[in-house]
Amino acid sequence: MTMANLHIRQYQPADRNALYDICLRTGDSGNDATGKYESATLLGDIYVGPYVEFEPELAIVVARQGTPLGYVIGTAHSSRFFDRCAREWIGPMLDRQPELTQPPLARRVDDLRPPQHPELLIDYPAHLHIDLLPDAQGDGWGRRLITAWLDEVWRRQIGGVHLGVSRNNVRAIGFYEHIGFTELRGDDTAVVFGMRRPARPRRA
């Protein structure tokens, strides 16, 4: 699948640093967060590292000449993922990133813990994160990435998927609504969207 010299492929371990960089460069409600934190790997340790470590088969990238420009990552079983993060990831991460032990950044670590409304995971047990650099935005690459990821999750007979987005990220909210996600709950700071597995398999 190619367009404008871009292509979609499976994540490879050599992509890890590039995904961390993309996470940082889109980490301020879709804008560049470079220089915002003491550590350039802080956001990646929360929103990329455990996913590519625990479920690399659910990591897909859009790349140009082998270099990732965007990705979609996630887990098919959020409860299992949060349990594993508690056992294997959060402690070492806090040792590496002591900035995350102090407010207000400490709240970001909660994104690796079960949600405040655990009933969400009954109907929407999977969750995902997607980030694209400007060069990969437009021409439908975000939709293609999510479609490829959802196809794999639906193949596993997972009943639904959810995701969270900052209320300030108006462009992302419009994108999720456009591709069929429904707002499940929200407040002044964030929105949670969900999608149920369709009755028929999705087609790219």
Image (cartoon, rainbow, N blue to C red):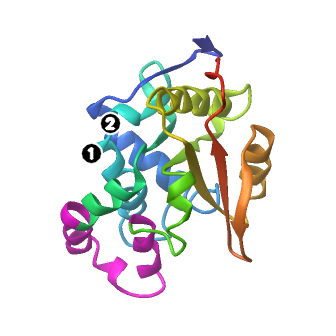
State yes or no: residue 144 in magenta: no
Mark 1 lies on a secondary structure that is helix
State the image coordinates of residue 194 (x, y, percent, origin top left).
Answer: 65, 51
Q: Residue at x 27, y 45 (%)?
A: 54
State the image coordinates of residue 58 (x, y, percent, origin top left).
Answer: 40, 35
Q: Identify the residue at the far bottom of this view.
A: 103
Residue type (three-letter) at the residue carrying disc 2: Pro
Q: Which mark, by number, is residue 26? A: none
Q: Residue at x 75, y 40 (%)?
A: 180
Give above or below for 102 relative to 109.
below
Residue type (three-letter) at the residue carrying disc 1: Glu
Tags 1 and 2 in contact by the CB under 8 Å rule? yes
Q: Residue at x 71, y 50 (%)?
A: 172
State yes or no: residue 107 in magenta: yes
State the image coordinates of residue 2 (x, y, percent, origin top left).
Answer: 59, 12
Give above or below for 64 relative to 176.
above
Q: Nearer the viewer, residue 113 or 26?
A: 113
Numbered label tally: 2
Q: Which mark, by number, is residue 53? A: 1
Q: Which residues are magenta?
A: 87-112
Q: Which mark, by number, is residue 56? A: 2
Q: Is residue 189 left or right of residue 131?
A: right
Structural crowding at the residue carrying mark 1, measured as other residues with C-alpha within 10 Å and reported as few (<14), some (14–19) or many (≥20): few
Could you tell me which quadrant the N terminus lies in? top right
Structural crowding at the residue carrying mark 2, measured as other residues with C-alpha within 10 Å and reported as few (<14), some (14–19) or many (≥20): some
State the image coordinates of residue 124 (x, y, percent, origin top left).
Answer: 55, 51
